[in-house]
Image (cartoon, grey):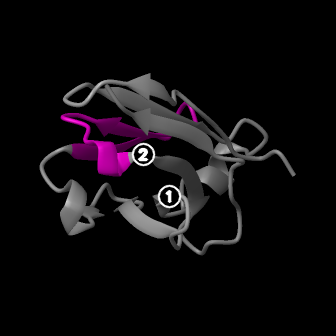
């Protein structure tokens, strides 16, 4: 419980940017490093979807809706995973969650609202 904590969400206007952070503060580095990581989102009335993922060696992939706008990265020393979100659109509004690549550990989520 409480192993993953997301932060950085908020209200932003269309075209704006946010950077989400996921901190695995209770996870030792030797446990953090071998994991792949993912960022997911769930909008009201919709299923949760994977939007970005990063492998242990830094390989990334993105869902088509966010390609070219979102960037996932990781800092193994700080045990953090980031999601840089640029050119945000109203349809990006959702609760964003980070997870381990095996989907066994999840954060509590952070709300992102894109609205003018």
Residue extending furthest front? 116
Residue 43 position within the rendered picture, expressed as x and y whole percent measured from the top left: 50, 58
Marks 1 and 2: in contact by CB < 8 Å?
yes
**Kind of element beneath mark 2:** loop
Magenta-colored stretch includes residue 74? yes
Circle 1: is it few (<14), some (14-19), or many (20+) Cα within 10 Å?
some
SS class, disc 1 = loop
- From the viewer's perspective, is 95 left or right of 4? left
The residue located at (31%, 43%) in the rendering is: 90
Q: Compared with residue 116, is residue 75 higher up or lower down, i.e. above or below?
A: below
Q: Position of residue 34 (x, y in %)?
A: 54, 61
Frontmost residue, 106 versus 100: 106
- What range is drawn magenta here? 70-92
In screen coordinates, is 86 left or right of 40? left
Residue 44 in the image: x percent, y percent?
A: 55, 59
Pointer 2 residue: 93
Q: Is residue 65 left or right of residue 57?
A: left
The answer to which image quadrant residue 103 occupies is bottom right
Q: Which residue is mark 1?
A: 43
Report whether 29 appears left or right of 9: right
The residue lying at 25 percent from left, 45 percent from top is 70
Q: Which mark is residue 65?
A: none
Q: Nearer the viewer, residue 111 or 5?
A: 111
Q: Tell me the CA gap for discs 2 and 1.
A: 6 Å
Q: Quadrant of the C terminus?
A: top left
């Amino acid at each position: 419980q409480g192993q993953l904590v997301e932060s950085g969400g908020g209200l932003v206007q269309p075209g704006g940017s946010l950077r989400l952070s996921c901190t695995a503060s209770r996870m030792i580095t030797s446990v953090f490093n071998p994991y792949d990581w993912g960022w997911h989102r769930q909008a009201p009335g919709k299923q949760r979807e994977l939007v970005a993922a990063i492998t242990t060696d830094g390989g990334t992939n993105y869902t088509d809706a966010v390609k070219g706008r979102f960037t996932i990265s990781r800092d193994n020393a700080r045990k953090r995973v980031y999601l840089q979100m640029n050119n945000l659109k109203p349809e990006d509004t959702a609760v964003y969650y980070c997870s381990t690549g095996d989907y066994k550990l999840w954060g509590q989520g952070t709300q992102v609202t894109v609205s003018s």
